[in-house]
Structures are given as C-alpha cells and as structure tokens.
Amino acid sequence: MSKLPQDFLNRVVANPLFGEKLVAALDEAPPISLRINSEKETQKQAEATKVPWCDNGFYLESRPSFTLDPHFHAGCYYPQEAGSMYIDAVLKSLKLPEEPVCLDLCAAPGGKSTLIVSFLKNKGVLISNEIIRTRAHILAENLTKWGYSNTLVSCNDPKEFNNFPHLFDLVLIDAPCSGEGMFRKDPQARDEWSLESAHHCAIRQQKILSDVWDSLKENAYIIYSTCTFNPAENEENIEWMLANYDCEVCPLPEFEGMEKDAKGYGHYFIPGKTQTEGFYCCLLQKKEAYHSNKKFKSGKRNVISQRLFNQAFTEKSPHIYFEENQNYYALTPSAFEVMTIIDKGLYWVKKGVDLGTIQKKGLQPAIDLALSFAFDLNYPKIELTKNQALAYLHGDTFALEGNVGYTILQYQGINLGFIKHLGNRFNNLYPKEWRIRMNIPTEFTI
C-alpha cells in the first residue's frame, strides 16, 4: 500500500482529535460490513456482530465474493461501510411528517438511498439524484433491486432543485469530498489526494449547500456528511452555513467511540476509535420562513387502471399506474403526486416500478416487477440451484424444464428476474448492463 500523503500526516498528527492513533489505524485491515433488506431478509447474518447504530447492519469476519452470491444481485443486502449506516440512527431521531418528501442529493451508488427508503417503508417519496449519468444508472439499478415503489432517480445539477422552493422535508447531502476516510479501504484515494483538491472540495461543498437551500421547507432537515477528516470540509463548512443561512445545529444520537468535532457541531467516526472507516455527520434544521406566492401545478399524466394488469399481478398496497412512451409504471400515491409537480423540471432515470410494455398477448414484464415486493405476481416460478442462478445472472441460457411463457427465476425463494420460456430453451431477460462480467469459477459452472 502506498504511503499516506505527507501533508495529510502533518495535519492529522497535529490535531488532538486524530493524532498518531488514526495514522496507525489507517494501515490496519478495514472492517467488512453490510446492511440487510428487511423485506428480503435471508437470515444469513443471524450469527454476525451487529452494527450498534443500525438495526439491519452487521459486521462480517471476512469479505466474501458478493458477485458470486445471488442474494446480493436480488437486493437482499447492500455491502456498506458501517459509519455510513449511522444515517439510520439520525433518521430515526427526526420529527418528520407522515409522508415526507426526501432528497438524497449526491446519491450514487445508492447505499444511503437504500437506507432511506427502508426507513420510509414506502411512505412519502425519495428522490435520489446523481449528476453523473453513468453513476445515476448504477444508482437506479441498486434502488430497483432494493424493491420499493416510492423512489425516483434524477440526473441533475443540484442548483436545478431550487426551481422547486419549499418542497423537501429532508435533504441528505453526502458531499463529494477529498476521501481521506477511504485511505485504508481504497489505496488509490491516497494517490489522488492533495491539499489543492481538498481545498476545492470544501468550496464545492459550500456551493452544493447553497444550491439546494431554497428547495427546503421551513424546519426541514439537512443531514450533511462526508468521508473525510478535513475540518475545512466538515465543521468549518457547518460554521459557514450558520453564518450565511438561517439554520441551527440539531443534536445527534451518540454511540460509544464517536467524537464531537472541534466546534461541537457534528460527530466523527474515526478508525481506531470505532469499527468504521472515516465518516463525519452533522444535522442542521432550516429556520428561514418561506415568503413566496409561487404555487406548484401538477402535470397531466396518462393514469390507467390497475385492472389492465390483473393477469400479471395483484397489488399489495395502493399504487398509481401511468403510461409513458408505451411503457407502464407504478408509484405509491404520495410519490406520484410529487413526481407530477416536478416532472418537467428534471431529467429522470427511474420512476417507481417499471412494469413493462403491453403487447398483443399481454404485459411484457420488466425486471423491476420481479424485484419489487409490492405486488403478488401471477407468473410461474422456477427455483434454481446456485450454479444455475449464477449462470442466469451471467446472461447464459441452459436446459430448464418449464412451460412456454414469461417465468420468474428464483434462488432460495427470492426473485432474480424473468425469462421467456420457449419450451426446450429460454431467452434470458436479465438486463445486459447488470450481468456478472467476471468468469464464473469452475465449481459454479453448469
């Protein structure tokens, strides 16, 4: 592993909050952790050590090959750094409305977004935004696999959300940062770090905070987080917010090992003191009153009846169904209402559950439908062995008994996706961009 940057060492050693203990910890093996999807729980973490601040977070003794686990592809769990899971405890401490409107502003690849929607439990709406289009599609993939139907994924500059003032009850800004907290987990982060890049990150973070300010309601929350130890990107940016905007710092849930920053605004998770990588979190609440006569108008949508899909599925809870460009979608009612308000102002990558397209013989289902838990599906199901499941996820076809038509493939009772069964063979409908790219080891080949 490359050496830690000297300018970084000079700063953290001189800071009593970090010191030599952090330097030593950054050369140790990082902890491995994941968070399970309670809607698709596999019970495989029953004997694992729990992450103290997250009910569904667990530490693993060693890092398995997630790529070779069908449950990972099915959205049963998400490998996530334990410090980042602290957002779960923060969310549970907030006083939010019953149907909150939430924004994850810098959301890719989706770890914190999947955490937020698990907290929401299909109430309210989560808009997950990522400015880089390739990363936005990865974000949409991870949210689709997680299975909730109150999610929207956008690909926009943060400043575009200020076109919708007084909209959000909660904004999570996991700000792009200098990445010092990843020096142990990602050696490349050491090589890319510089004093100049850290300075530019702090300036960019201030711009992001400013860009989204008007979109927050009065008394709305901002959860601000980074994965760096740089005070200029953390507590000094919070001080800048307090000086320039009408907001106040809110108390955070405290756990053993957490350290308050030098100004007492937020908390650090520090390797060597907590079983985490580097993480910083602060909670702000907007106090500025909203003074505008601007009103949002809902856009027109081609809403359709659920009866159109009776042969394909039965809904477990109410949804709104609509059509766009011959594709059909489902959203929870509150998520649909928000989408119609802001639909024309943002570039969308994902809107709820993509159900598929209507053909002469009925619905041609999309992968979203198989991975959502909001519907009872009326398609035949075939249980696969692990070897078969990995082959399917790799994009392969193989001999498989079944009846002609669309069929759901499962592994240990969990949906993986669709095939179109042709009797003696099948067309593999697993999305090409999601497929396992590595060569499957011999012991897993059919």
Image (cartoon, rainbow, N blue to C red):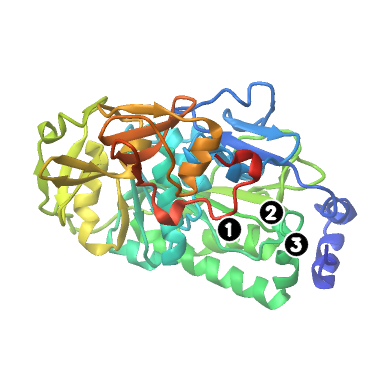
Q: Amino acid at mark 3?
A: Pro
Q: How far across and how far down the image is residue 330, in percent?
A: 23, 41
Q: Identify the mark nearer the N-term, 1 or 2.
A: 1
**Position of 314 relative to 22 (above/below):** above
Q: Identify the mark nearer the N-term, 3 or 1.
A: 3
Mark 2 is surrounded, within 10 Å at the Cα level, by few (under 14), some (14 to 19) or many (20 or more) other residues, namely few
Quick check: 328 left or right of 52?
A: left
Mark 3 — residue? 187
User: Of 400 and 93, which appears nearest the observer?
Assistant: 400
Q: Mark 1 touching mark 2, by CB under 8 A?
A: yes
Q: How far across and how far down the image is residue 117, in percent?
A: 42, 39
Q: Secondary structure at mark 2?
A: loop
Alpha carbon separation for disc pair 3 and 1: 28 Å
User: Of 251 and 98, which appears nearest the observer?
Assistant: 98
Question: Looking at the image, which residue is at 61% across and 25% down?
Answer: 44
Residue found farthest to the front:
424
Would you identify the image quadrant in which residue 387 lies?
top right
Question: Looking at the image, which residue is at 75% across and 62% down?
Answer: 187
Q: Nearer the viewer, mark 3 or mark 1?
A: 3
Q: Nearer the viewer, mark 3 or mark 2?
A: 3
Mark 3 is surrounded, within 10 Å at the Cα level, by few (under 14), some (14 to 19) or many (20 or more) other residues, namely some
Number of numbered discs on residues: 3
Res. 401 visible in picture: yes
Would you identify the image quadrant in which residue 145 lies?
top left
- Mark number, residue 263: 2
Q: Quadrant of the N terminus?
A: bottom right
Q: Amino acid at mark 1?
A: Ile
Would you identify the image quadrant in which residue 240 lies?
bottom right
Mark 1 — residue? 238
Alpha carbon separation for disc pair 3 and 2: 30 Å
Q: Amino acid at mark 2?
A: Lys
Alpha carbon separation for disc pair 1 and 2: 9 Å
